[in-house]
Image (cartoon, grey):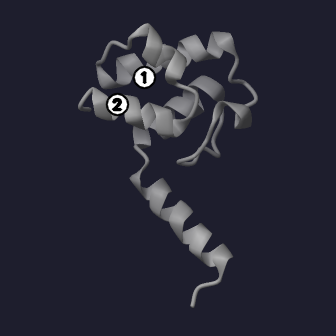
Amino acid sequence: MLDPMTKNENLKLSEDATMRPEIRKIFSDVFQFHNVHFNTSREEVEKWDSLQHVALIASVESTFSISLSMDEMMEMVSVPDIHAILDRHGV
């Protein structure tokens, strides 16, 4: 039987393995944040302020060749949110 910590670590590794590498690069470029993981949220990223949020949006739109709605721009407050938005756009 796996102890809870090992199970949680395995889940995190599994989630990180499915995280798009482009998102890691975006976080590195926009926020100079290199510890991005599948559940990274705005609260964890010190440089994620309103100005950098605009840079994040521009980078996501440019990287994935999509146009985000205002609602999607406001929804984007974590890596899972970004993945969900990209899935809806079919990219």
Horizontal and vertical percent position of residue 70: 45, 8
Earlier along the polypeptide chain: callout 1 or callout 2? 1
Type of the residue with mark 1: Val
Q: Quadrant of residue 72?
A: top left
Q: Could you tell me if the residues under marks 1 and 2 are in contact, i.e. CB atoms within 8 Å?
A: yes
- Within 10 Å of the Cα at label 1, are there few (<14), some (14-19), or many (20+) other Cα atoms? some
The residue located at (72%, 24%) in the rendering is 47
Vertical position of residue 11 compared to residue 80: above or below: below
- Left or right, residue 32 beside residue 27: right
**Residue furthest to the bottom:** 1
Residue at 72% across, 37% down: 44
Secondary element at tag 2: helix
Provide residue 10's location: percent of width, then percent of height: 53, 70
Up-down: is 12 above or below 1? above
In terms of depth relative to the viewer, which is nearer, 76 or 65?
A: 76
In this picture, is 78 found above or below 9? above
Is 22 situated above or below 4?
above
Residue at x-position 37% and y-position 17%:
62
Q: Quadrant of the C terminus?
A: top left
What mark, if any, has residue 60 been given in the picture? 1
Amino acid on which the number 2 mark rests in the picture: Leu
- Residue to which mark 2 is pinned: 86
